[in-house]
Amino acid sequence: MKIGILGGTFNPVHIGHLILAEEAREKLGLDKIIFVPTFIPPHKDNVNIASPQDRLKMLRLAVASNRYFTVSDIEVKRQGPSFTIDTLKAFKAKYSQDELYFIIGSDLLKYLEMWKDLKQILSMVKFVAATRPGYPLEQIPPYIHTLPIRAVDVSAFEIRQCAAEGKSFGYLVADKVFDYIKKKKLYKTAQGR
């Protein structure tokens, strides 16, 4: 099998994440995509981040209708800061006969030099960077495969800001995620803008 792994904070998961995953699945011929929410994002300030349990629940709600999508709670269960190398080692052990594709948005390329054990990561998976509006695929290291995807200019930051200000963010997230955010009153503070 060819398995895509899409990690992130997903604070909250939005249509951009889902479109990225679906286009990556189709264009790379993947059999499934595993979404992996972080427990504590290592490169963010951790302000106004929904609990790991809330982010996990929102992801499960968002992907429930897609038979190719699944969610792993490996990093949430591990707790502490999440490092890609640890997660990929676990997936490599679990899916030892499968081909793994690690998918990131092009916005994360600026952090690559900070990644723990990057060389080892590159030996374990096919590393794919998908385009994101405002983060063009320029100066890409040769070890990264690029994947142009449909431009959807939506960000989790924008959604949190709308929620904090009482503005509409419908259609930027799946309906069930929208309902969950409203019901739980997530992102009501304007911190972390």
Image (spheres, rainbow, N blue to C red):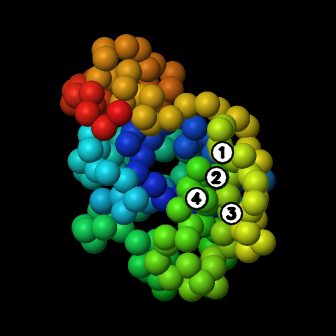
Which type of secondary structure does the marked residue at label 1 adopt? Answer: loop
Counting from the top left corner in percent of width and height, residue 15 is at 55, 34
C-alpha separation, residue under disc 3 versus residue under disc 2: 9 Å
Number of the label disc, if any, that sits on residue 135: 1
Q: Nearer the viewer, mark 3 or mark 4?
A: 4
Nearest the viewer among 59 and 192 is 192
Nearest the viewer among 80 and 98 is 80
Which type of secondary structure does the marked residue at label 2 adopt? Answer: helix
Q: Residue at x 24, y 47 (%)?
A: 51
Looking at the picture, does residue 20 appear above or below residue 111? above
Is residue 89 at least partly visible in the picture?
A: yes
Counting from the top left corner in percent of width and height, residue 137 is at 74, 52
C-alpha separation, residue under disc 1 versus residue under disc 4: 10 Å
Number of the label disc, if any, that sits on residue 110: 4
The residue at which mark 2 appears reads as: 106
The residue at which mark 3 appears reads as: 128
The amino acid type of the residue labelled 2 equals Ser
Alpha-carbon neighbours of circle 3 within 10 Å: few (<14), some, or many (≥20)?
A: many
